[in-house]
Image (cartoon, rainbow, N blue to C red):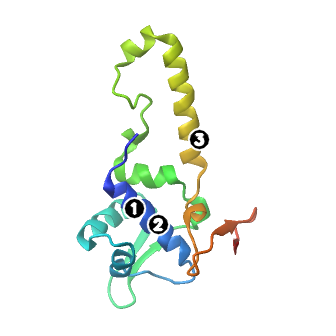
């Protein structure tokens, strides 16, 4: 499986914003500079994330990007789908036609099991799990959604 640079940048940017949850908005320029992502490209990525309801953008003084909801409510799968589209998690990623897969049932069953595992991983991994605080320490989400530093 391979995701585009846009998805990689989107994941990194959302994780960065999750790490700075005390701020009301993070300027796109700051994210661009800190993560070394071209600003114009990051702006396009943020537009896709905003269209999907993952981030909100604010123009003007004090503006920037904020998460639309807490990072513990945003999954890795949602971020990738916002950027790549619904087809990002199609069942047959190898490019093998469905008709051919059905002719090799043992391989087909293994492949389906792998796809279910991957889908589960992306659907249950939340963006707060990828964030770190300013000191480089991991942040942990508790059962009630609060974040604590490890």
**Mark 1: few/some/many CA within 10 Å (<14, 14-19, 20+):** many
Q: x, y percentage for residue 141?
A: 69, 65
- Residue most extreme to the top: 103
Query: What residue is at 46 percent from the left and 74 percent from the top?
Result: 66
The Cα–Cα distance between marks 2 and 1, rounded to whole angstroms, is 6 Å
Q: Are marks 3 and 2 in contact (CB under 8 Å)?
A: no
Local secondary structure at mark 2: helix
Residue 20 horizontal/vertical position (percent): 53, 78
Q: Which mark is residue 85?
A: none
Residue 91: give x, y in percent of width and height: 45, 30
Q: What residue occupies the far front of the structure in this picture?
A: 136
Q: Residue 36 versus residue 144: which sits nearer the camera?
A: 36
On screen, 104 above or below 113? Answer: above
Question: Residue at point 56% right, 77% down?
Answer: 21
Identity of the residue drawn at 34% across and 79% down: 33
In the picture of the structure, the residue carrying the numbered disc 3 is 120
Contact between marks 2 and 1 (CB within 8 A): the answer is yes
Q: Which residue is mark 1?
A: 10
Label 2 neighbourhood size at 10 Å, few (<14), some (14-19), many (20+)?
A: many
Looking at the image, which residue is at 54% across and 22% down? 110
Q: Secondary structure at mark 1?
A: helix
Write down the quadrant of residue 120 in the picture: top right
Residue that label 2 marks: 14
Q: Report how many numbered discs are placed on residues in the image.
A: 3
Regarding residue 53, the answer to whether it shows in the image is no
């Amino acid at each position: 499986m391979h995701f585009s640079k846009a998805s990689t940048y989107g994941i990194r940017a959302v994780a960065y914003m999750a790490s700075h949850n005390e701020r009301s908005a993070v300027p796109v320029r700051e994210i661009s500079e800190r993560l070394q992502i071209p600003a114009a490209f990051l702006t396009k990525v943020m537009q896709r994330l905003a269209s999907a309801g993952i981030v909100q953008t604010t123009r003007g003084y004090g503006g920037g990007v904020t998460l639309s909801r807490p990072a513990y409510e945003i999954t890795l799968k949602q971020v990738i789908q916002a950027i790549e589209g619904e087809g990002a998690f199609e069942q047959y990623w190898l490019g093998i036609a469905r008709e051919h897969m059905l002719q090799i049932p043992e391989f087909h069953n293994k492949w389906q099991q792998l796809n279910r595992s991957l889908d589960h991983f992306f659907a249950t991994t939340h963006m707060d799990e990828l964030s770190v605080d300013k000191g480089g320490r991991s942040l942990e989400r508790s059962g009630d959604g609060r974040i604590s530093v490890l």
